[in-house]
Image (cartoon, rainbow, N blue to C red):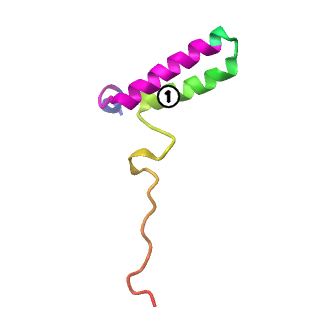
């Protein structure tokens, strides 16, 4: 887990951090505090290196089909 936090940073993770910061500033300036939840979501995804779109094959389903089906 520690190596995932400090290594393997790619462009997508950096974009998520930048998006989180921009959304947080925008939310505070416009006093739309509900948007801070979206900012926190992007920041958590960037820090943990996860996504909500099954990236990395985390949503793959096992192949339960049989070879001898009639």
Quadrant the N terminus occupies = top left
Kindly report the secondary structure that dominates the magenta region of the rendered protein: helix
Q: Is residue 32 above or below residue 3?
A: above
Q: Which residue is mark 1?
A: 44
Magenta-drawn stretch contains 10: yes
Residue plotted at (30% across, 32% down): 8
Circle 1 sits in a helix, a strand or a loop, which is it?
helix
Give the percent coordinates (x, y) of residue 33: 68, 17
Kindly indicate the quadrant of the structure image that contains residue 37: top right
Q: Give the magenta-colored segment's residue range.
A: 6-27
Is 42 displayed left or right of 27 in the figure? left
* Mark 1 Cα shell of 10 Å, populated few (<14), some (14-19), many (≥20): some
Give the percent coordinates (x, y) of residue 25: 57, 12
Residue plotted at (52% across, 21% down): 20
Q: How many marks?
A: 1
Residue plotted at (41% across, 34% down): 49
Toward the viewer: 39 or 6?
Answer: 39
Magenta-drawn stretch contains 7: yes
Q: Is residue 67 above or below residue 70?
A: above
Residue plotted at (70% across, 16% down): 32
Kindly indicate the quadrant of the structure image that contains residue 5: top left
Kindly indicate the quadrant of the structure image that contains residue 38: top right
Identity of the residue furthest to the top in this view = 29
Q: Is residue 27 above or below residue 66?
A: above
Give the percent coordinates (x, y) of residue 21: 51, 17
């Amino acid at each position: 887990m520690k190596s995932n936090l400090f290594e393997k940073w790619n462009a997508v993770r950096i974009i998520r951090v930048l998006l989180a910061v921009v959304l947080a500033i925008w939310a505070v300036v416009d006093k739309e505090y509900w948007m801070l939840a979206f900012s926190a979501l992007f920041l958590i995804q960037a820090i943990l290196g996860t996504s909500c779109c099954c990236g990395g094959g985390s949503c793959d389903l096992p192949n339960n089909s049989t070879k001898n089906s009639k």
